C-alpha cells in the first residue's frame, strides 16, 4: 500500500469491498467501471456517495473499489462502509460525522438459513388436523 492512499474494507450481507482512497477530483471506479456504469439505480449511487457528502469531500478524492460477492444492494452497502472506513483512516476528523450517521457500523443482518422439514427459513407447511 502506497503512502498517498488509504484503504478501507467494507462488508454487507455477503459482499466485501476493498476501497482505495487517493487524492484526486472525485472520480469513483468500481471493478474497472465507473460508478454510474456499475450501479444502474440512483438509490445505489446515492448510498455509495453518502459518506462523501457528509464529510464534504465529493471532489477531494479519487476512489478505486474492488467489490465481490452478494447482490447490488449488498455491494452498495459494502462500498459505503469501505469508503467511510477509508475516510476515517485518511483524516481522524471524519470519525464523528460518519459515526453519527451510522456509516461506520457494519450492518450485521444476514439471510437466515433454510431449516430441514420446512419449505423455507420460517415458512411452515400447512397444518391439517384431519
Image: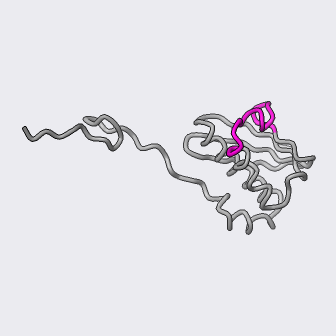
Q: Residue 99: within the magenta?
A: no
Give the camera-side residue of 85 and 77. Answer: 77
Q: Residue at x 46, y 43 (%)?
A: 111
For the record, the magenta segment spans 29-44
* 109 with respect to 95 (left or right): left
Figure check: 55 above or below 67 = below
The percent position of residue 73, horizontal first and vertical second, equals 61, 42
**The C terminus sits in image quarter:** top left
Q: Residue 30: within the magenta?
A: yes
Which quadrant of the figure has residue 91? bottom right
Figure check: 104 above or below 93 = above
Q: How is the image coloured?
A: one colour
* 24 with respect to 123 (left or right): right
Q: Residue at x 36, y 38 (%)?
A: 114
Q: Residue at x 17, y 40 (%)?
A: 127
**The N terminus sits in image quarter:** top right
Amino acid at each position: 500500500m502506497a503512502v498517498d492512499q488509504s484503504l478501507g474494507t467494507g462488508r454487507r450481507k455477503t459482499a466485501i469491498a476493498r476501497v482505495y482512497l487517493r487524492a484526486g477530483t472525485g472520480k469513483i471506479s468500481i471493478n474497472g467501471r465507473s460508478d454510474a456504469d456499475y450501479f444502474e439505480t440512483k438509490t445505489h449511487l446515492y448510498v455509495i456517495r453518502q459518506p462523501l457528502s457528509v464529510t464534504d469531500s465529493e471532489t477531494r478524492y479519487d476512489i478505486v473499489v474492488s467489490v465481490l460477492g452478494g447482490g447490488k444492494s449488498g455491494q452498495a452497502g459494502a462500498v459505503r462502509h469501505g469508503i467511510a472506513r477509508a475516510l476515517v483512516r485518511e483524516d481522524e476528523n471524519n470519525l464523528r460525522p460518519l459515526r453519527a450517521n451510522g456509516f461506520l457500523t457494519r450492518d450485521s443482518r444476514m439471510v437466515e438459513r433454510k431449516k430441514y422439514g420446512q419449505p423455507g427459513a420460517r415458512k411452515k407447511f400447512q397444518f391439517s388436523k384431519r
